[in-house]
Amino acid sequence: MPDTPDHTALLAQLQTTLNAMPPVQAMDIRIIGYDNGVLSMQAPLAANVNDKGNAFGGSLASVMTLAGWALVSLRLSLAGKQAEVYVADSSIRYRAPVYGDLQAAARAAPEQDWDDFLNLFSKRGRARMTVRAEIAGGAAELEGRFVALSKG
């Protein structure tokens, strides 16, 4: 599913929501786009550097978590659903230091199905989706369960 004007407007709304959060604003996290089921984000190293000159681990965790949150939020919006999305739990593996800008990509875990998730949300007003996110080059990986709760 490539970016379309509809995706572009929804991504801009998500970016506005992100910018309203002071820690996210300080980290300068930006949504890059959404294509073929993958939501991409980036953040500059300069705003997320640690004492060793590489990316702070908490920043890596944050950008991956937010990429998962934004992906689930976007898919709900594309389906016309109003929901609050929360991360329920996650696990992270750090594999290598990152010495450049943080670039994360999030997608549904292989065993997950968006139609099943959306149907369950429509029936119950809540649903869970497992998302996998990674930092470019495999430097870090996150698997997280995100919960969507109906706003109504």
Image: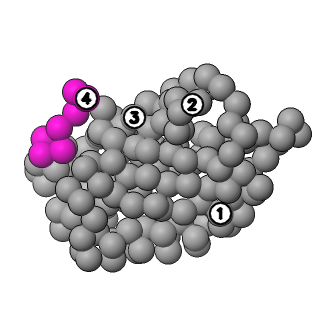
Picture residue at 75% right of the left edge, 57% below the top: 47
Report the Cα–Cα distance between label 2 and label 4.
Answer: 18 Å
Q: Looking at this view, is 87 or 131 the one in front?
A: 131
Q: Which residue is mark 1?
A: 28
Mark 3: amino acid: Arg
The answer to whether residue 150 of the structure is visible from this angle is: no
Mark 2 or mark 3: name the one nearer the start of the chain: 3
Which contiguous range is marked in magenta? 110-116
Is 115 inside the magenta-drawn segment? yes
Mark 1: amino acid: Asp
Report the Cα–Cα distance between label 2 and label 3.
Answer: 11 Å
Q: Quadrant of the C terminus?
A: bottom left
Where is residue 70 shown, x and y percent of the image? Answer: 41, 56
Q: Looking at this view, is 138 or 9 the one in front?
A: 138
Residue 82 sits in quarter? bottom left
Report the Cα–Cα distance between label 3 and label 4.
Answer: 9 Å
Mark 4 or mark 1: name the one nearer the start of the chain: 1
Picture residue at 24% right of the left edge, 60% below the top: 2
Q: Which residue is mark 2?
A: 140
Where is residue 58 shown, x and y percent of the image? Answer: 69, 40
Mark 2: amino acid: Ala
Q: Which residue is mark 3?
A: 132
Residue 30 sits in quarter? bottom right
Q: Could you classify mark 3 by the number of other residues whose Cα lies within 10 Å: few (under 14), some (14-19), or many (20 or more)? A: many
Above or below, 7 against 27 in this view is below
Which secondary structure lies at badge 4?
A: loop
